[in-house]
Image (cartoon, rainbow, N blue to C red):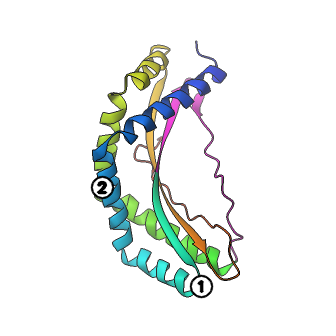
Amino acid sequence: MIDEKNMRVMLEKMESAAEEALSNSPAFHEALQSLKAEIDRDPRVQSAMNRLRASGGNVFSSLVPHIRIRVRTSEGVVALSTNDLMPTRPAGEPMAQLTQELRNAAAAVIMRGRYREELDHIMNEAVCASGRFEGIASEIENAGHEVVICLDLSAYAQIRGGSQGARDPGKSSSSLEPLS
């Protein structure tokens, strides 16, 4: 029996091992760059970026992958917190509304993007090849629990400009293996 505190420690180690495995995968980085290019070419994304720039914002965007591991137990699902570290601006501000539009457009591309399945496949191969990850996952599965691996693809926009001057993240996530 694995208590919740130990389960969380194991989750942290598995997420770390999974992200390390992906950081060593040229195929993953290539597919990620292709998805980013697909996002950048999207007309809705381009429109939102242009309106942000026209509003005086200097926009930098990136695509940041995060591995999220969840464990299904008989008592429920155990997962690490996914708190956003950067605050968002109040929803009523024009820049915040435009940033939300950018989030939504990027999320739509991620959800329908041709590289989603490829990234999922590469992630599963890389993670399963990690001896460190597999050792911890086996221990959890031998205790009667199910390990679920999710790839969270977050599109971020950092906006600077005018009197705004602050960081404003635009985030949209797509879990490739969402919990059902």
26 left or right of 168?
A: left
Measuring from the top left, give residue 179's x and y in whole percent.
48, 41
Magenta residues span 65-92
Instruction: Identify the image quadrant of residue 165.
Output: bottom right
What is the quadrant of the N terminus in the image?
top right
Front one among 23 and 8: 23
Q: Which of marks 2 and 1 is nearer the N terminus?
A: 1
Return the residue at label 1.
56
Query: Residue drawn 72% across and 70% down?
Result: 90
Tell me the SS state at disc 2. Answer: helix
Kind of residue at badge 1: Gly
Q: Where is residue 26 in the image (x, y as percent from the top left)?
A: 29, 45
Q: Which residue is denoted by mark 2 in the rendering?
A: 115
Are there few (<14), some (14-19), or many (20+) residues within 10 Å of tag 1?
A: some
Residue visible at 34% across and 50% down in the picture: 29
Q: Position of residue 173 (x, y in %)?
A: 49, 55
Q: Which residue lies furthest to the bottom in this view?
A: 54
Q: How many marks?
A: 2
Residue 52 picture location, percent across and down = 54, 80
| Residue 110 vertical placement versus 48 (above, below) | above
Vertical placement of 171 versus 151: above or below? below
- Alpha carbon distance from label 2 to label 1: 32 Å
